[in-house]
Amino acid sequence: MSAAVTTIEVDAAEHRASVRLSTAQLAPRLISRSSRAASVALVAAGALLLPGDQVAIRIRVGAGCLLRLEDIGGTVAYGGRPERSRWVADIELEEGAALVWAAKPLIVADGAEVVRTTRARIADSAALLIRETTVLGRSGERGGTIRSRTMVDRGRHPLLAEGLHASGAAPQPGVLGAHSVFDAVVLAGIRPVVQTPGTMMLEGPGAVSRHLGSHTHESPLGALSHRWTDELAAAWAARQENTYDPAHR
């Protein structure tokens, strides 16, 4: 069991952004950077997720910076022992900052019990896109138990707080039912132009789109995530030039 924290911090600099990385159970790798933007890949530093694992990642994006975070491969949560695995992501976006993190699927194998928490605090002029996909069971399995919670605060006010509790061994009507794939994309800080029938607009600037299915490749949220990413990137670039369209707010 590890209490170490993977950290990713990005700050603007004259020629190349300052990117500070630390490795724990996840190893961040710098792919590219400019004066205000960086791309970072996340790879597992060992077998994940084993029963009892404690994975923590802290992300801070400095004022006016853009971070694109990419997972290298999905994550399998394994069963075998009656211990919960925990995955906690803590995100802070300063004024004018933006983060895009389209995570690869989390597969909850038979007997696994996972608690996943995503907390984000974003400034009023920041923007965030996160995609989280949960799959109950590997091929031929019903899957373990997932308790997932996502919380986003914008400025001093809560923008989104939602949770999911599902078990492949004991499916509940009105939750996932017979479905094994739960896909969700969260956009915070701007109002999307592109929407789908599954899109729910938030009270503040932002939206959530969800999909239930049996196979990850059937989800329409991959295409939506790409289009929302384009919108976010355009909004971020416009904010750097002080030409941001307030209609997106």
Image (cartoon, rainbow, N blue to C red):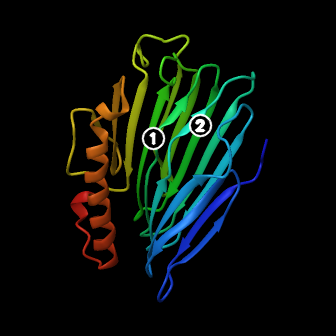
Residue neighbourhood size for the residue with mark 2, other residues' Cα within 10 Å, grouped as few (<14), some (14–19), many (≥20): many
Q: Position of residue 172 (x, y in %)?
A: 47, 11
Q: Amino acid at mark 1?
A: Glu
Q: Position of residue 156 (x, y in %)?
A: 51, 55
Q: Please report the residue visible at 72 percent of the width from the left and 38 percent of the height from the top.
A: 53
Q: Which residue is mark 1?
A: 132
Q: Please report the residue visible at 34 percent of the width from the left and 49 percent of the height from the top.
A: 206
Q: Nearer the viewer, residue 182 or 108?
A: 108
Task: Identify the disc placed on residue 116.
Answer: 2
Q: Position of residue 194 (x, y in %)?
A: 20, 48
Residue neighbourhood size for the residue with mark 1, other residues' Cα within 10 Å, grouped as few (<14), some (14–19), many (≥20): some
Left or right: 50 as drawn, with respect to 33: right
Left or right: 34 as drawn, with respect to 170: left
Q: Nearer the viewer, residue 39 or 173?
A: 39
Q: Nearer the viewer, residue 152 or 108?
A: 108
Q: Is residue 206 above or below residue 143?
A: below
